Each structure stands twice: as structure tokens, then as C-alpha cells.
Amino acid sequence: MDRSLFVRHAKQIVQVCARSERQLRGKAMNELAVLTASSDDAQGVSLVVAEDGSISDIGRDVELIAKYGDHRFGREIDATDCCVLPGFVDAHTHPVWDGDRVHEFALKLAGATYMDIHEAGGGIAYTVKATRRASEERLYDLLRDRLAQMTRAGTTLVECKSGYGLDKESEMKMLRAIERARRDARVGISATYCGAHSIPKGMTEEAATDDVIHVQLPEMRRMMARGELHVDNVDVFCEKGVFGVESTRRILSAGKEIGLQINFHGDELHPMGAAELGVELGAHAISHLEEISADGIRAMAESDSVAVLLPTTAYILRLKQPPAREMIEKGVIVALGSDFNPNAYCLSMPLVMHLACVNMRLTLAEALAAATINAAAALGQSDKRGSIEVGKMADLVIIKAPRWEHIVYQFGCHSGVIKHVIKDGCVIVE
């Protein structure tokens, strides 16, 4: 299929990076590479996508139109009065489940905490019951629809976790649904095994840990060897009353031994030393971190482990915000994720960026870097995605706005701003 594309006459092309950076830290998060049409250039700026879907050229209209004027492209897009951004990367989601928890939202509004609901048999346990009952076909249909909504909001790469099965049969069912979506969907997927999301009813932490290591991971590995699954990451909910530090260490180490990237929940409700553990184990990413310690921040700043911050979770659970400003100022690689799940029902990365700016005090530029290049780094894909650079895949969002900042500024109404979403050179939303 010819995926060649000529996007011309744009007001801005927000490259984010222009020197092959794999991530941005500290002050560099505010120094985005942006190619802007000059005031005396009526035509704007352009980019060219090759037949394989990779970006082959970026520059001013006058140069690229002269260079490619006689070339026949698979498609041309007139981006007059538009800005071009990298496709958004959602670095943390739980999109495979059945049964909503709207009744728990009402309980939270009345003052119940996350752990109050969890200890009463709600929360993850409630969703596990519904998900175990659901057929694989139903889970796939629900996942497909959620991914479609994400792409309409500009997401071109999304991390998808299992974790609402908690036994071998149900976790593999969820992973098969994710694999089917990975093959069929028009959005990129990084698959995460999260069988250690909670302790199943009637099991001890030690028994649940052993089941994950000796039953679930071996079955998943066999399926991967047969080509039935492709799984990228291993996750554990490291939390007081769930999986402690030593259980987390055992599970993450077992996942790493079979070739999975470590990408896990840590330091959300209680300070657990998860950030320090993640750095020790060479984690690609650690999510949440509302309760990260000063030592954890120092350790992450000296490593390449990415802090995936989740503005929707702190917002809906009325938690204190993670210390995002301190993390950025001390050199931690900061990314963003929607944390889409039955507890935080958000499918929109523009909304996540807005919340990060308002509640976590990120600048607009920092939020965009966190939702593109740094989020791609959290998934180990920033060599190919997360910025608009020659040689990278053409994952793009074209917005009808005079400046790129409108995608964050226009709170909750991004559907009227997004004109096209492009994945690997193919237009998937228009």
C-alpha cells in the first residue's frame, strides 16, 4: 500500500524534537522544536511522507513544493490555517474490561476513599467479576470501541494492560483480545501483562505471587512462543494491602527474565519505595508516583526510568498531585497517561494534558513533550515515534487552529479542533 503523503501550507509543524533525542528532561521540555511559517511566507510549512509511512522531508512550502511539485503522492492534504503535531502517546491505560463502576463514582463523591471501596469488595474486584464472565468477543468489541474513541482524540500509540482477570484463563483471554486489536486496529498498541493488579479473593499475597510467576507467566510465554500473543511489558500494582515491595520485585524480575519491559504502578497511595525499586531493576517506566520519596526522585533523575504521571487519577480520587514540578526541575523524564479504567473514565490525551497543566503545574510545552516523545520513551518506542523527524514514522495530528497550544487550551472540546489523525502515513480520522 502506498502511504506517501504531502501535507502542505501548515502554519506550524511541531516537531517536538529535531536532533534525534529519545526523551526530553528538565529545561529541554520547554524548548520544543517548532517550524513556523514566517509572516512573509503566505504558503506556510510542509512535510513529506514516503511510501513506507515514514517521514522523508520537512521544510517550507516554497522549498518542498519546488522539490516535489511533479511527484505523485498517494494523498495530499491542504493544511492551510492548521498546525501539525506528533500523534499523542497514551502511556498507561486499562482498556479491557466489562461492567462500569458509575455507582462507585457516587460513593467517592460522598467521601469514600479508593481503599474503602476496595476493602468492601468493590473497585478492581467488582470489575474482575464482570470481566471473568464476559466472552473474549465482547471484551474485544469493547476494546475496539474504546480505541476508536482514543484515536478520535489524537492518540496514535496506546499502552494496553490486562489485569481484570487475575487468573490464568481470564488474563490470557484479555491478552488475546489485546492481541486481536493490535493486529486489527488502526492505532499502535504496546501490550502489558498486569496479572498482579490485585490479590484474588481467598488468596494470600504469597499465593497470588506464586500463581503469577509459576502459572500465568509460563502460560503467557508459551503462547508468545507459538505466535499467539505479542506482549511488551510486565506490570504490578505495588501498594500497601496489594503487592508489597518483595513480591513486586519477584514478579517484575520474572517478567524481565522472559524479555518483558518493566512498566509498573508504584507509590500511589502510600510511599512504598517503588521508584527506587524500579530504578534498581531497570524499569522502563513507573506510573502514578503521587507518594514518591525524595530518594525516589533522585534515583529516577539519575536513570532513564520514565515517570508516567496520571492527572485523571489524582483528580477523581482527590489525591494529592504527584510532585511533577520537582521531578521536572531535578531531571526526571516525565510522561503522561490517561489511566483509562472503570475508575478514571477518560479517553482523551488533550484533556489529560490540560489537567496536567492546571493541577500539576506543567507548562503547555512540558505537557506536549510528556504526551509525545517522553510517553513513547516509556514504551521503548521513542526511536520511531513521539516526534516529527525525518526517518520516524508519520504519526500525526492536524488541528484547525492558529497555534498548536489550542489542542490543550480548548478544554474538553478537542473534537472540533482535530481535523486529521494520521498513523504510519495513513489517515485514520478525518
Image (tube, rainbow, N blue to C red):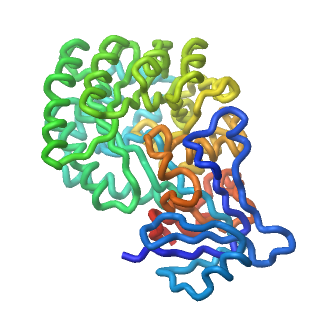
Measured from the top left, where is residue 50 in percent x and y?
49, 71
**In which quarter of the view is residue 325 placed?**
top right
Measured from the top left, where is residue 210 in percent x and y?
18, 18
- Tell me which residue sits at (33%, 16%) in the image: 249
**In which quarter of the view is residue 137 placed?**
bottom left
User: Would residue 22 be seen by someone viewing this image from the given angle?
Assistant: yes
Quadrant into which the N terminus falls: bottom left
Measured from the top left, where is residue 233 in percent x and y?
34, 36
Q: In the depicted view, which residue is nearer to us: 69 or 37?
A: 69
Query: Quick check: 188 left or right of 131?
Result: right
- Tell me which residue sits at (55%, 37%) in the image: 335
Image: 111 above or below 376: above
Residue at the extreme right: 40
Q: In the depicted view, which residue is nearer to us: 122 or 12?
A: 12
User: Would residue 416 be seen by someone viewing this image from the given angle?
Assistant: no
- Tell me which residue sits at (26%, 53%) in the image: 140
Query: Quick check: 250 left or right of 370?
Result: left
Measured from the top left, where is residue 75 in percent x and y?
50, 80
Residue at the extreme bottom: 70
- Tell me which residue sits at (50%, 65%) in the image: 422
Image: 343 above or below 3: above
